[in-house]
Amino acid sequence: MITETIPIALDGERIDRMVSLITGVSRAAASELVSSGVVQVNGAVSTTRSVRVHEGDVVMIDYVHDDSPVVLEGEAGVDLAIVFEDDDVIVVDKPAGLIVHPGAGNASGTLVQGLLDRYPELTDVGDPTRPGIVHRIDRNTSGLLVVARTERAYESLVGQLAERSVERRYEALAWGAFESPVGRIDGAIGRSKRHPTRMTVSTTGREARTDYRVLATSVGPVVLSHLECRLHTGRTHQIRVHVSSIGRPVVGDDLYGGARESFVVPRMFLHAETLGFDHPATGERVVFRTPLPPDLAGVLDRLEFPEDEPAPGAVG
């Protein structure tokens, strides 16, 4: 346990910056420490990274220093589909099944290690445990991911994500029909106390907002809604948790009630279709899109849609 008293020179600083200064970890890693509940301010757990601390506050962090350097090595043979690359950023179309970075039980074969084999300079960008990574996509979700190639790009993209100016749109297939063709789900998301591997809508969670638009609703062999979902925030499992919370889980999602015998699919139907951001070097707005992969397009082909409803396809 690390204990520090805030001096007058740091009065008013954010808690995540203080944790970074105290522990020596990156700002991104400090934010994760705060979110995980291991940081206390004056004896109370603080899980909001934007909270300000003041002179005399006592900050306690349940953290053990590990001075051994983190060194990730590149791995050849990792499946990478590069949509765009320049001196500052790399845009990847991640296939389903590929983990973004090493973690518990997954020490190798990740997207990061494939990128390091091709772009070894990423080693010095951002968090050394996930170099270049500014946002993530679940293992069984496919689609677009932007990776920073320089520290300048990393800081710019992290800032844009914090300001919620990055456009992230997903295609999803959900159980049942929606009452409204468009809607917004506002619900704070936190880790479930009953099931530690799941997230849940919770009054003690972090703010989360998802907009959805119904592209088409099938009439057979089961009633499913083809959706476009736009993220305003980027919480773990956000779309999956939000649509499940209103009784419309993502088809094939076995963690949140979407895997059902009445309509079996090859994997969870969730695809990061659109990604837009301001280019870190030029400031120009860039937008990338990728169509549904064949396995998910084949799922739509098995459904029947009303004749007066447009055929489902790539989000416009």
Image (spheres, rainbow, N blue to C red):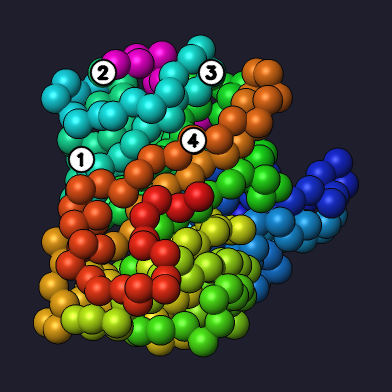
Under circle 1, the secondary element is: loop
Q: Residue at x 18, y 53 (%)?
A: 295
The CA span between labels 3 and 4 is: 16 Å
Q: Is residue 150 above or below residue 54?
A: above
- Alpha-carbon neighbours of circle 2 within 10 Å: few (<14), some, or many (≥20)? some
* Residue 107: image tag: 1
Q: Is residue 47 left or right of residue 6?
A: left
The residue at which mark 4 appears reads as 288
**Residue span colored magenta:** 118-127
> Residue 11: percent from the left, percent from the top?
85, 50
Foreground tag (2 vs 3): 3
Amino acid type, callout 4:
Phe
Under circle 2, the secondary element is: helix
- Alpha-carbon neighbours of circle 1 within 10 Å: few (<14), some, or many (≥20)? few
- Is 104 within the magenta? no
The CA span between labels 3 and 1 is: 27 Å
Foreground tag (3 vs 4): 4
- Is 121 within the magenta? yes
Q: Is residue 277 above or below residue 54?
A: above
- Alpha-carbon neighbours of circle 3 within 10 Å: few (<14), some, or many (≥20)? some
> Residue 261: percent from the left, percent from the top?
12, 82
The residue at which mark 3 appears reads as 88
Q: Is residue 174 left or right of residue 89?
A: left
